[in-house]
Amino acid sequence: MQSGGGFIIDDLSTVFDEPSRSQLQQTTNATTSNADSVATPKQLTSKQEGKLRTFLDGVLQDITRGYRKRFHPSSSLHTLSSYLAEWMRLLGVLAHVPPYGSASTNLLISYLLRCSTDLCDGVTGYRLAMEIQAERSLRKKKEAQQAAGQDSTRNGGGAADNEATQSDGEEDQDQEEERQHQIASRTKQLNLALQTIDLLDRIWAAVLRGNLINLPVALSNARRAFPDTPEAATDARSSDGQQSHLPYHPRIVHSTSSLVPSPAIDGRFHWGSNTTHNTPRESLPIHGGRGNRTVGVTDQVRLRNIAISSREKLFSWMRTELDAPPPPIMDELDPEREPNDNTVQGVFGIKSHPGTAGEAREDGGEEADFEDVEIGGEAEEVKEEGYDAEQDTEEHRHYQDLFESKLDPDEDDEDDQEAPAATGGDSDQTLGASVLGTVEAVTSNEAHDKRKREDSPDGEMEPADPEEQPRADGLPSKRPRATAAEADTDADASEAGARMSRSEMGSINFSLSDAIGQWDIAFTRLFSRTLRTLSDLSGGSKRAGKRDFATSLAGISGADEQEPADER
């Protein structure tokens, strides 16, 4: 950046090229000698700000135009990798804008918010298969060119026979190579998406603190955390294992100043981390900056909403592209579907003892059914419908006796045995069940069994079928308890429908492979630094507000005590 001629970046490629070993050594020495230094940037002039806005608007317009034509082969942003490369260049420019001064700070925050929304929404509009198809077509063209060159140098005759014998083996080999290419392409694209968003997350974490991001270090850390090539992954593992000149932990923010966040892993404090002066910083505090008040409260709320919604969209997009089923939505307002122990041991315990939950649920249902019956209310309904006791005196007295015997707590069992059995037809039984709600039959079991014997051709007594016993349809009744085998079967079915479906909503999904589980962890941690920093800033503002309120109360009380002394 030059103060005389406007906002100028000589070569954008130098921002993203891997630094050489000598440059890394110089950076390490400079950091060691001046680890606690602060940045002293210059404010942007009006001319610089105007040129910067023009440049950023032009780049965003080009990205939008290429994104809309992404399905056309002639588009410059036909694949996700090319789309993310343009965003990396734009983020590199924004990282050089210091959050210092009202003009440059407002410009930086507004464009970062726009980039956060457009970047995440644009990633979800791409398919991983688009780049796979482009690579396949390019690979076929190269193979065709090589085959044409080999055909021109071959001698006829024996070459055709050799091709016929080797065709089967080559087809199997080609299929395996195609599968490996697809896996490598998917891994590369997902890592590039995570790498770009991780860099944006690091920039936001620095801006929220009012710090200036150290782009080479932040970009190097993002590439080490999510390497886009197997060689980069191997280099990252070897450098970590050998304790090289640039110590690095993927998700640890090292700090040597109180102005920078403490070492944390995705918002959680990591005890025992190394915070020596040899550790390079990702951001530097700005001398004379606004610190934690760089981003206003309204922009903080917008940023939090953008981060949460973007994380959910990207997670669903990742699951869709990997042909993995989306995780079930947990309904926090439905406690009945939540098992008592939502762990692996609890799930297996429910499966091994299914009868316990089924019996408890059945007993609870019986109690609820009996509690819902209101005998007095039903009797009043019969009177309101125009029931005349004088026209049917015997029925009225009969049901009145039944009500009294049912509700009399001092009656003995002997009185029930001495009472004459009521004789009535099926209409009496149905009417009695409809009125009482809990009486399944007015006649005794002996009369019912007698009818069964008369109906049987052999004259032998047949067991009474509980399903054929007359009872009121649609009214609660006490059903006979099933056998142990039937109870186990019903309990297994009910557990599979209720409890086991809920266990799939836990933290462990047994059907997914380890690879998809790793992607789940990576995508659920997107914008973790930003959200953690926003939480810290919100907590600090609340504590500061409480202190100011207490100070004002103390000042008011002190003034009230001094008033009588002044009057004297």
Image (cartoon, rainbow, N blue to C red):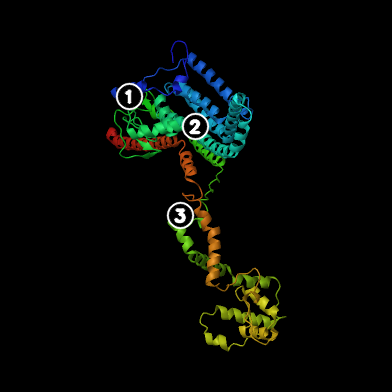
Distance of label 3 from label 1 (alpha carbons): 49 Å
Furthest residue to the top?
4
Q: Position of residue 417 (x, y in %)?
A: 56, 87
1 up-or-down from 508: above or below: above
Q: Residue at x 53, y 63 (%)?
A: 492
Q: What element carries label 3?
A: loop
Mark 1 burial class by Cα count in 10 Å: few <14, some 14-19, many 20+: some
Query: In which quadrant of the rendered view does residue 377 lie?
Result: bottom right
Q: Residue at x 34, y 39 (%)?
A: 270
The residue lying toward the viewer, choosing from 191 and 359, is 191
Q: Residue at x 57, y 25 (%)?
A: 63
Amino acid, disc 2? Leu
Q: Where is residue 13 in the image (x, y as percent from the top left)?
A: 47, 20
Q: Name the residue under label 1.
A: 28
Distance of label 2 from label 1 (alpha carbons): 27 Å
Amino acid, disc 3? Asn
> Is residue 93 visible in the rendered structure shown here?
yes
Distance of label 3 from label 2 (alpha carbons): 35 Å
Q: Is mark 1 on a helix, strand or loop?
A: helix
Amino acid, disc 1? Thr
Q: Name the residue under label 3.
A: 342
Q: Which mark is residue 192?
A: 2
Q: Is mark 2 on a helix, strand or loop?
A: helix
Q: Where is residue 196 in the image (x, y as percent from the top left)?
A: 48, 30
